[in-house]
Amino acid sequence: MKHLLFAIMLLTLTLSMISCAPAAAPVPTRAPAVAIAPTFPGQPSLGESLQQSKGGDATQNAATDRAAASDERMIVYTVRLNLEVQDADKAANDIAAIAAQHKGYLAASNMSRDSKGRMRGSITVRIPAESLDAAQKQIEAIGLKVLSRNKDSRDVTDQYTDLNARLKNLTATEDELRKLLDTVRERTGKAEDILAVYRQLTEVRTQIEQIKGQMNVLEKTSALATITIDLTPHEEVQVLEPETWVPNRTAAQALRALVQALRGLTDLAIWLLLFLLPILIVLLLPFVVLALILRAVLRRRKKVTPVA
């Protein structure tokens, strides 16, 4: 029982060392750690099995490294174009047709109408890497002028090789854990021992699936290049001709100004007569009435006063 727990602890340490290896930078291929498992009569120990697989894995890794060195590099290409076009809608449809012609597809489209009523925006297509140059030339030919061009490449070969090495190590560890699980079931049959090995096996399986997913992403991004095209509508240049003196035009402008002035004066008179005058009458009426009353009072006083 103690030997079995010791073997599980060593396998846990091995898994933690493998999972902590960085995925973005190449690291030396790590051989599976040698774990000590209980030895049963007529069956090799887990350490011996791992030592045997170590030699086979080293030979296989060396062959893989030699094959990777001779194969083409995995490059992720990204292109950004800014095209001046006559009709952005038509240009977007033509670009999508070019992508389909090269067995690519439309990845994204963002179009909108500006304040002048013209369509503008961007479109993103995915093109097989081997057809990138030909497709780029066709796309640039659609526009009236290439305003900007930016091409970026990223080598992910080392990252892919590192993920592949980690995958092989984890696969070998998974095989050994399965053998250990079968051994524990046959020899001891204790639930805690079986669950301890099964937890380690589940953790290894999860890491394997994660690495396979990362490798799948690298394979797809290196197989298909990304081209993003900004579509800028063409600006029409208006030529202004010098104005010539035309008396008729000047007379017409003067008459229009006179009519507008007379119209303004007439409107002002109407406002004064119908709006301002009644208001003034209403405001001045109390003062007029008061003045008449005062005048009448003063006249009475003059009549009452005796003559000397």
Image (tube, helix red, strand yellow):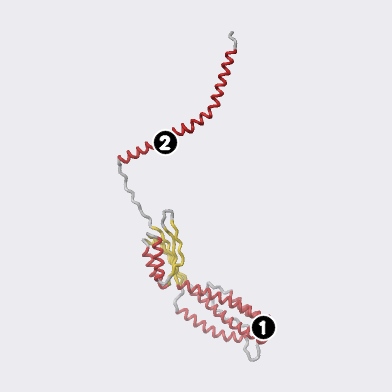
Q: Quadrant of the C terminus?
A: top right
- Residue 138 in sight here: yes
Q: Nearer the viewer, residue 118 or 68?
A: 118
Callout 1 environment at 10 Å: few (<14), some (14 to 19), or many (20+)?
Answer: some
Q: Give, as a three-letter code, the residue at label 1.
A: Leu
From the top left corner, tell me how far across and down residue 27 is, in percent. 54, 75
From the top left corner, tell me how far across and down residue 45 is, in percent. 63, 87
Residue 188, placed above or below residue 20: below
From the top left corner, tell me how far across and down residue 96 is, in percent. 41, 67
Q: Give, as a three-letter code, the residue at label 2.
A: Gly
Tell me the tag on residue 4.
Answer: 1
Which residue does the numbered mark 2 point to in the structure image? 264
Q: Residue furthest top?
A: 308
Q: Is residue 129 left or right of residue 297?
A: left
Residue 4, placed above or below residue 308: below
Q: Nearer the viewer, residue 116 or 267?
A: 267
Local SS, label 2:
helix
Q: Earlier in the sequence, mark 1 or mark 2?
A: 1
Q: Residue at x 43, y 70 (%)?
A: 104
Local SS, label 1:
helix
Q: Nearer the viewer, mark 1 or mark 2?
A: 2
